[in-house]
Image (spheres, rainbow, N blue to C red):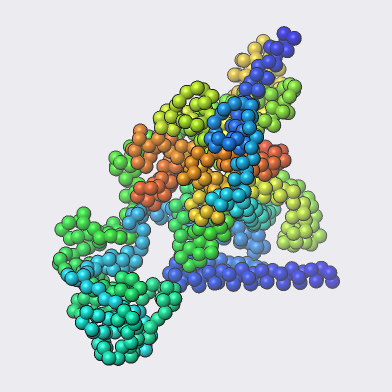
């Protein structure tokens, strides 16, 4: 009986939770489709179906355990990876962020020129009886008034309008004023071209000001070209995300859109010297940095582990102090070190009685990066080596000692090779970690100094990942396409390194 | 005596030297937080002043909503810590204990993807969340809820992998006995496995807490508003921005923000060291 009751409760709880989650997701799905985010909307729909199907049927027991994890995994791991791959084949950078339809719309909207006299009118925004946006225009100089909508202009006799203290018409038959408060909710009304005369229209310049414009650019959808009716120029889709002038392909209209350019971002890495030169230098430093970091942290960690591998007095205290750098939140420690390397006020120059500008000289900056990483990383290898040293059977060392080997020989010929064999997967993992040690570089030097590399995006201490970040989010042109291509390159490198490490650790063979 | 010197002296010399290296920045931060001169400047190894001015500044200055930052960090990190374990444990249990088609493929995929550094997909996550913002600002770019979702999703691979390792180490006899007694997989999970694995789950969630607390760049990209930042982002902006050379309050803030993490870390030392040998590297 009690089992029955509990089962029932659990069932009701499950259904209630499922209902709430479904409701939230359904709401989001609807919003997504309304905003034309079809990919995200479809995923949300899929999530709803997957959740309900899994928990309301007995189709698969394991799936009941997996579904939430899988959904998160798809949304925030798989999807970004696929998205990165796809972005890397696009011309996708500042000025080419929008979709083609949006970009073309903006180009056309921007393609208007004021009439020769720069005529402006006092206006009020309202609506017609049929509910269309309309403006009531007051041509005060000529004492003329008219109502204008997208399609029509209706003259209103001066006798039938109501004027405010400035002589601006606020009410007229067939026109209902819309309050400023209502207007502020949406700017739809301000994008409408209100009828004026001939090719000219009135565009909204401010809440109560309209100006006369002539549409210069028109989009000919059928021919797929944009024409400038004033100058007679034609602009064609250049296949790379911009409308370019026929006969002068360098003259492009802005904004452009994100357009597929296939492997151009990848070929650029090799063929474009502005990209290739810094990339190679950054790559070399990345490998040197990761290699040196592993080497120094491992060496110091091992040395300490060997020194403290014997029950000497104070070992516990030493140990607690030695792991402190590892226990500290690394973001804080890195920022603290950044302050210590300050030229004027930093403790390092102070202690050394020097006046070195650490972060403006490439070599000093690189040295500082390695020193800080040594501080951050040696406790890791100290802890690991301590554990591993105890795991190495002592028989071998004893046998060697009996054979007359001195401690140095024992270490070089027996202990170290054994340790390296045990720890090689961890050394490789550490290399892979440092290969992408973004926080250290970004927070300590910001990748600088930049002068010695290309002076703009890449700096002397930039590693691939921080260089990629600068390309995508830096102060210059933000190039998501190129950044994604480099990300893919990094992933291939890191995955190969990691897979090699896993093969060594034989993890791959243990499951099945 | 001579023998002792030869055997042990170098050990002490080395240990003390490296201990000084370890302690130097930390000691300096404590000194700076108590001094009034506002830089990480070493005036003397012995504290010459003892002022709580920097700490008072942190709590009272309208320019730096330090308490908001701490609160944000705690809320975000605990939400991620709890949810990631609730979601991850179920998957880890299934991977470890249940038999199903495609299990091997699933584990291999998990292994491969958990190696993918989340930071590589940074621009993709950014663009995706920017689009989410257009139809649901509450969970899109710039919102803490959105950041939590990204953290949860991004840590899913690593967490399931880590949890699976722990689950594998819990003996399976009990759940096999339950199975023989007729318990379903879901019952075994809730009635046998979860109580048994509770300490392990707590440890993993605390590790996840530390990791999230320490995360910088996503938080930096996501949380633009002053009041909405996490401690890490807030303090970094505080010294990097217009208040540069404001090291005193920064030192005080970083001490306060670090204490909980250091305490958690030291109390979990044993588990973390075990986890280390399993191949995880703390960021």
Horizontal side of residue B57 vs B178, given as left or right: left
What residue do we see at 61% from left, 37% from top? B33
Give left or right: position of A153 versus B15.
left
Where does the image place residue B188, in percent across and percent down from the top left? 75, 58
Total labels: the figure holds: 0
Q: Is residue A119 visible?
A: yes
**How far across and how far down the image is residue A246, in percent?**
17, 60
Decide which of B164, B49 is in the foreground and name it.
Answer: B49
Furthest residue toward front: A165
- Please state the horizontal and vertical placement of residue A502, each as a whole percent of the image: 56, 39
Say if B127 sits above or below A288 in the image.
Answer: below
Residue shown at 47% from the left, 28% from the top: A367
Residue B153 visible in rendering:
no
Q: Is residue A149 left or right of residue B177?
A: left
Q: Residue at x 19, y 76 (%)?
A: A199
Q: Image point 72% across, 61% down: which residue?
A: B186
View extreme (top): residue: B2
Q: Quadrant of residue A148?
A: bottom left
Q: Quadrant of residue A240?
A: bottom left
Quadrant of the image containing the N terminus of chain A: bottom right
Of A179 and B237, nearer the camera is A179
Out of B114 and A397, give the one closest to the viewer: B114
For residue A281, which quarter of the picture? Answer: top left
Relative to residue A97, is residue A223 depicted above or below?
Answer: below
């Amino acid at each position: 009986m009690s089992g029955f009751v509990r089962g029932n409760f659990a069932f009701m709880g499950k259904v209630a939770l499922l209902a709430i989650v479904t409701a939230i997701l359904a709401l989001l799905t609807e919003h997504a489709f309304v905003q034309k985010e079809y990919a995200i909307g479809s995923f949300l729909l899929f999530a709803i179906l997957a959740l309900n199907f899994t928990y309301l049927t007995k189709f698969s027991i394991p799936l009941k355990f997996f579904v939430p994890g899988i959904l998160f995994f798809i949304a925030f791991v798989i999807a970004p990876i696929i998205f990165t791959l796809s972005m890397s084949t696009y011309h996708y950078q500042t000025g080419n962020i929008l979709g083609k339809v949006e970009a073309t719309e903006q180009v056309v909207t921007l393609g208007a020129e004021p009439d020769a006299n720069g005529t402006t009118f006092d206006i009020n925004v309202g609506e017609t009886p049929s509910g269309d946006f309309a403006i009531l225009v007051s041509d005060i100089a000529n004492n003329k008034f008219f109502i204008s909508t997208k399609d029509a202009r209706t003259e209103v006799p001066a006798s039938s309008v109501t004027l405010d203290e400035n002589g601006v018409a606020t009410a007229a038959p067939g026109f209902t004023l819309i309050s400023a408060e209502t207007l502020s909710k949406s700017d739809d009304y301000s994008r409408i071209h209100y009828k004026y005369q001939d090719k000219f229209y009135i565009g909204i310049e401010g809440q109560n000001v309209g100006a006369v414009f002539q549409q210069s650019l028109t989009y000919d959808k059928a021919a797929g070209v944009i024409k400038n009716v004033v100058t007679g120029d034609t602009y064609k889709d250049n296949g790379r995300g911009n409308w370019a002038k026929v006969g002068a392909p360098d003259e492009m209209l802005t904004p452009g859109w994100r357009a597929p350019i296939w492997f151009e971002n990848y070929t650029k890495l090799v063929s474009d010297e502005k990209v290739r030169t810094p990339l190679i230098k950054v790559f070399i430093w990345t490998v040197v940095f990761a290699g040196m970091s592993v080497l120094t942290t491992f060496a110091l960690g091992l040395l300490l582990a060997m020194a403290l591998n014997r029950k000497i007095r104070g070992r516990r205290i030493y140990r607690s102090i030695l792991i402190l750098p590892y226990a500290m939140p690394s973001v804080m420690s890195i920022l603290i070190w950044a302050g210590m390397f300050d030229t004027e006020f930093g403790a390092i120059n102070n202690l050394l009685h020097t006046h070195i500008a650490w972060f403006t000289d490439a070599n000093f900056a690189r040295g500082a990066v390695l020193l800080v990483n040594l501080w951050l990383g040696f406790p890791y290898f100290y802890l690991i080596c301590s554990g591993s040293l105890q795991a190495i059977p002592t028989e071998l060392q004893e046998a060697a000692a009996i054979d007359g080997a001195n401690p140095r020989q024992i270490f070089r010929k027996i202990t170290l090779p054994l340790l390296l064999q045990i720890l090689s997967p961890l050394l490789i993992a550490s290399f892979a970690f440092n290969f992408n040690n973004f926080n250290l570089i970004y927070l300590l030097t910001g990748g600088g100094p930049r002068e010695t590399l290309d002076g703009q995006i890449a700096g002397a201490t930039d590693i691939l990942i921080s260089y990629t970040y600068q390309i995508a989010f830096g102060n210059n042109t933000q190039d998501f396409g190129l950044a994604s291509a480099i990300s893919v390159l990094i992933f291939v490198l890191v995955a190969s390194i990691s897979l090699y490490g896993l093969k060594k650790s034989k993890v791959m063979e243990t499951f099945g | 005596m001579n023998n002792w010197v030869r055997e042990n002296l170098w050990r002490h010399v080395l240990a003390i030297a490296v201990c000084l290296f370890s302690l130097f920045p930390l000691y300096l931060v404590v000194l700076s937080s108590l001094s009034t001169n506002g830089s990480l400047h070493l005036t003397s190894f012995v504290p010459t002043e003892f002022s709580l001015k920097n700490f008072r500044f942190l709590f009272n200055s309208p320019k730096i909503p330090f308490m908001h930052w701490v609160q944000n960090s705690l809320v975000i990190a605990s939400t991620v810590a709890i949810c990631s374990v609730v979601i991850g444990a179920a998957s880890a249990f299934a991977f470890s204990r249940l038999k199903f088609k495609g299990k091997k493929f699933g584990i291999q995929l998990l292994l491969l993807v958990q190696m993918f550094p989340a930071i590589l997909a940074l621009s993709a996550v950014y663009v995706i969340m920017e689009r989410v913002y257009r139809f649901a600002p509450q969970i899109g770019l710039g919102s803490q809820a959105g950041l939590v979702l990204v953290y949860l999703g991004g840590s899913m691979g690593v967490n399931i992998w880590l949890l699976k390792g722990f689950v594998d180490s819990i003996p399976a006899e009990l759940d096999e006995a339950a199975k023989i007694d007729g318990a379903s997989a879901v019952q075994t999970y809730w009635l046998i496995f979860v109580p048994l694995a509770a300490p392990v789950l707590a440890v993993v969630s605390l590790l996840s807490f530390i990791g999230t607390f320490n995360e910088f760049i996503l938080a930096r990209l996501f949380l633009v508003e002053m009041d909405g930042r996490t401690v890490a982002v807030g303090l970094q902006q505080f010294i990097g921005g217009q208040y540069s050379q404001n090291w005193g309050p920064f030192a005080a803030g970083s001490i306060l923000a670090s204490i909980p993490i250091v305490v958690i870390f030291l109390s979990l030392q044993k588990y973390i060291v075990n986890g280390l040998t399993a191949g995880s590297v703390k960021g």
